[in-house]
Image (cartoon, helix red, strand yellow):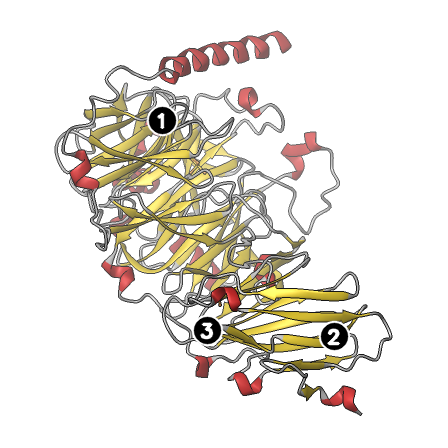
Amino acid sequence: MKVSIFKFTLLVTIIITSLYSLHSCKPRGAQSAISGDAAAKVYVAPGKYDEFYNFLSGGFSGQMSVYGLPSGRLLRVIPVFSVDPEKGYGYSEETKPMLNTSHGFVPWDDLHHPELSQTNGEVDGRWIFGNGNNTPRIARVDLKTFRTAEIIEIPNSAGNHSSAFTTENTEYVVAGTRFSVPMDNSNGDVPINTYKQNFKGTVSFIKVDPKDGNMSIAFQILLPRVNFDLSHAGKGPSHGWFFFSCYNSEQANTLLEVNASQRDKDFIMAVNWKKAEEYMQQGKGKKQTVRYAHNKYDENTHTATSTIETEVTVLDSKELPGLVYLMPCPKSPHGCDVDPTGEYIVGSGKLAALIPVFSFAKMQKAIADKKFDGDYQGIPVIKYEEALYGEVQKPGLGPLHTEFDGRGNAYTSFFVSSEVVKWNIKDLKVLDRIPTYYSIGHLMIPGGDSKKPNGKYLVAYNKITKDRYLPTGPELAQSAQLFDISGDKMKLLLDFPTIGEPHYAQAIAADLIMKNSRKIYKLEENTNPYVSMGEGKAKVERKGNEIHVYMTAIRSHFNPDNIEGVRMGDVVYFHVTNLEQDWDVPHGFAIKGANNAELLIMPGETQTLKWTPEKAGVYPMYCTDFCSALHQEMQGYIRVSVAGSNTPLTFSTGKTEPAAIAENVLK
Ligand code: K7E
Ligand code: CUA
C-alpha cells in the first residue's frame, strides 16, 4: 500500500515538474507576441477615465483591490477581512466590530471570490460580495462608498471556498464548506480518522434583502462529507438551481494530494434551491443551536455593530427527495461555471485531460427518467452520459476556471500548461490558445459569469511572476495580464502587478458605479453618539478613568489641540469629527506611542481612537493626511500627569492659557 502511494506521488511529481519546467523559462517570442498597437489600446490619457472597474480579490491579503481597465491603474484597496492601518479599518473603535467572529476578533482572512450583485442576470453595481476562506465568512461591500458594509459568519463550515456566488437577482449568495467537519453542535473531540462517521458537509444559502442588501442565513443543506470547491448559480432555464464542484469523494482525511486523487470521477452537485424554499415553507428545516457573528456598518452612526446569532435551520439532503443530485465529473473538479444561456455547466477537472460540459436540459430529463447510477452517501448520482452535453478534447493541462464572452465562446484557464484556451460551446472545438506568464489561476471577462458578458477584454490572474518585472527579492507581486478578445484571436495588451494573490475578480462598466459614488457624509446626518457638530461643540469629559475627547478637524487645526489633566491609568478616547463637507478632504489623526493605527476620517464622519498612555509626559498628535498648505501645522499636544495628580482637566485651541476647564473637575 505504502509503496503504491509513493509511486503514485512520484509519478504525479514527475508529470507536474516536467510540465511546469516547460513553462518556467521564458517562451521564445514573448515580446514579439505583443502587437504594436497594444500600447494605444490600453492608454487612458491623463484626466480620462477607464472603461471598467476591475475588482480583484487579494487572496491572503484579505482585501479587495480595484483597478481601472484597460489601463491597469490601481484605484483603491478596500479593506474587507483584514485590518488596514492606512484607513484605520479594524483599529478605530467604530470599525473593530466588523472583524468580530464566534472566535473573537480575527484581524485577517483569505478572500478568494468577489461577486457583483445582479439584477435579471446582469451585474448591477450595487454591491460586491467576497468570501472569507479561512474563518468562514461572507462580506458585502457597498459600491456607493467602496466600504465593507456587512460581514456574516457561516456556522457548520470550515474554509468557505465555494463562495460568494450569487443567483440572477441576488436572491441568495452561497457558501459551501471546503472541509467536511463535525457539526458545531456535536462533540468535535473525535479521532480525525473517524472522518467517515463523524464529519459532514454543508452548503449555506444567504438571503440578500433587495432593498438594503442585508444578509441573513436562510437555510443550510446537510450533505455528504466531501470537499466543496467552487460553485455557480443557474440562470435563465436553470434559474432555481445552484451547481457546486466537489472533490475528495474518496473521503480522505490525510495526504489528499494522493488519497483524494484516486477516483476517476468526483462530482458536480446540483442543488434545487426553489425546492429547498418549498421544504422550508413546509417546515422541513430543523433548527440547530450554533454561534456565528453578524456584523453591520451603519452609515449614519459611522459605527459597526456585531451580534452573535445562535440558530440556523438545516435541511437534510438525505431525507428530502429532489433537493440534491450528483453528476460524475472527471477528475478533481475545480471550476464550476454556467454559460450565459444557463443551459451549459462546465466542470474543470484539474487532473482531467478534457473538459466536460453538462446540459441542464439533459440533466432534467435524466432526473425525470431516473437515469441514476445508484447513490453516493444517500444522494442520487445521475449517469455521466445522461447529463453530459459533450467533452472538449485535449484542451490543455490543468483546467481551472471558465468565463464566457456572450458570443457563444468559453475561455478556460490552464494552470499546468499556462495558457488561456478559447473554445466554442456548441461544437466544443478549440478555437484559439494564448500563453500566460505564468501559470494562470482565474480569468475574468467583465460580466463573464452573468447573462450579459461584455466580451471586449479578458484578464488572466497568474500565480507565478518570475522574470516579468524588476526583481524585488524572494517575493514578487502577482501578475495580471490583459487580453483583447474582441477578434477571433486573443491578443496580449498589458501586464500589471497586483496586490496579495488575486484569485477570482469581476469587472463592470464604469458608468454603473460612477453615477452613484458617494462624495461626502453629510454632517447633519451624522448620528454617531460622539459627534461634535461644530467647533463650539468640542469638549473633553472625564467618566471615572475614561477621558472622552470630542474633537473636531477642519483645515488646518484640531479643536481642542491642547489637552491637560489626563492621568496615568486613564483610557483616552479621541472622537474626531471631520467638519469638512468637500469631496476628497479627509483628515488623519495619530498620537505618539499609540499601540494602534491612525484614524482616517472622511468629511462629515466621526471616528474614535482608543489610547492608553504608558507614562506621564507630553504627547504630540497630528493630522496624517496632507489636507492643505498648512497641513503640517495641524498638530497639538496632550499632557499626561502621574496617577492621582491634581492637574485640572482643561482643553483649548488657540489659547496660550487654558480657557475651558472641564466642569466635573472644577468642583
Ligand atoms: Cu481557483 Cu479560490 Cu477560485 Cu484560486 S480558486 S485560482
Ligand atoms: Cu488635516 Cu492634514
Badge 2 element:
strand
180 relative to 607, above or below: above
**Residue type highlighted by circle 2:** Glu
Quarter of the picture containing the N terminus is top right
Find the residue positioned furthest to the front.
656
Would you call the spot at circle 3 few (<14 residues within 10 Å), some (14-19), or many (20 or more)? some
Q: Residue at x 43, y 75 (%)?
A: 580
Q: Report the residue marked by disc 1.
A: 468
500 relative to 129, above or below: above
Q: Report x, y in % for residue 409.
A: 19, 35
Left or right for 608, reference 458? right
Q: Report the residue marked by disc 3.
A: 555
Left or right for 414, reference 563? left
**Residue type highlighted by circle 1:** Arg
Left or right for 352, reference 101? left
Q: Report x, y in % for residue 212.
A: 41, 69
Ligand 2 has an atom within 8 Å of the beta carbon of the residue at disc 3 = yes
Q: Is residue 234 visible?
A: no
Q: Report the residue marked by disc 2.
A: 546
Instruction: Say which label, 1 or 3, has the lower sequence index.
Output: 1
Q: Residue at x 62, y 29 (%)?
A: 253
51 relative to 628, above or below: above
Instruction: Say which label, 1 or 2, has the lower sequence index.
Output: 1
